[in-house]
Image (cartoon, grey):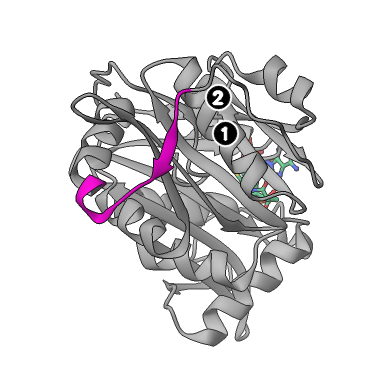
Amino acid sequence: MDLKTLPVTLRPMTAAQPDLESALNLSQAVGWAYRLEDWRIAQTLGQGVLAEENGAVIGSALCWPYGDGFATCGSIIVSPAMQGRGLGRVLLTRLLELTGRRAVMLNSTTEGMRLYQSFGFEAQGTVQQHLAPALNVAPDAADPQVRAARAEDLQAILQMDRRAFGADRQRMIAEFFQTGSVMVVAGDAGPQAYAICRPFGLGQVIGPVVAGGAADAKALIRYFLRSRAGQVRRIDIGGDSGLGAWLTELGLTEVDQVTTMMRGKRPAIPGPERLFALASQSFG
Ligand SMILES: CC(C)(COP(=O)(O)OP(=O)(O)OC[C@H]1O[C@@H](n2cnc3c(N)ncnc32)[C@H](O)[C@@H]1OP(=O)(O)O)[C@@H](O)C(=O)NCCC(=O)NCCS
């Protein structure tokens, strides 16, 4: 099915309040805990498409290009009553026009996998979502010291992130410097690990967490679990992060799993830093 046989129009999603509210209605209809502000940030950092039928928004899809070689996609939603008519296929086709020649990564729900596979996306790994209602965690005496990031740490943070992610997320990190709390582990030659905690969904999300080793990553996560006591905390980790059992032991239960899928070849990740927790399932 395509737009000729479907009585639907596609148009760019804007930052205007009615677009954000329509998107919020969609995410609520499929049970996602996004806030209006989460949609605002997602739209600001990327490019989005809305599908309309008779003036009502019935679908959304966004992408976030990171330079010329790589992009992530997400927030692909078709209103429950409109599913199964080929609209998911139409939205993804438009997204892939927007991402062009870039390699594309997304984190797929079970429902989305067949759609993405038919466009050449291949499963590459998993992401586990861990959640804790309200939890306080004692510091560990062995933890390296963490401190608040300063404006002059930004360049070092961007470089660490690029080495761990393989592409430049400057706009996203600059946004989170405004809306979140950024902490670093200080090394001899400047920051050697960083993490961000920011409002998202039901509470606070911890991520990205970028470090050269698990000890630094854990110290940063533990800091945010202490400093945000009383609030819901969420963290999304890659299946290969090695942190799952540790988080569960701390009281952050695994509540969901999605499949990371790639279309094309992701840019090389030089390291030595690794991405221990995602910025979000959308942003990677
Ligand atoms: C995933 C989603 C966007 C698909 O939209 P849609 O308009 O129903 O999809 P289409 O009608 O274009 O169908 C595309 C393919 O997906 C398959 N599909 C659709 N819904 C499905 C479901 N619930 N479970 C399994 N496969 C499904 C269709 O059978 C079709 O495959 P086929 O061509 O091989 O038959 C929609 O189900 C949705 O919004 N789900 C809730 C939110 C979500 O999980 N989004 C994905 C985030 S990564």
Image quarter for ligand 1 equals top right
For the C terminus, the image quarter is: top left
In this picture, residue 277 sits left or right of residue 155: right
Near mark 1 (Cα within 10 A), the count class, few <14, some 14-19 or many ≥20, is many
Q: Position of residue 136 (x, y in %)?
A: 76, 40
Task: Specify whether 253 is left or right of 108.
Answer: right
Q: Residue at x 62, y 77 (%)?
A: 22
Element type where label 1 sits in the image: helix
- The boundaries of the magenta stretch are 144-153
Residue under pointer 1: 221
Magenta highlight on residue 151 = yes
Q: Measuring 41% from the left and 41% from the top, which residue is drawn there?
A: 147
- The residue positioned farthest toward the front in the image shown: 141
Residue at x 34%, y 51% (from the top left corner): 173
Residue 48 spot, x, y in % from top left: 42, 64
Q: Which mark is residue 218?
A: 2
Q: Secondary structure at mark 2?
A: helix
* Disc 2 + disc 1, Cβ < 8 Å: yes
**Res. 93 visible in picture:** yes
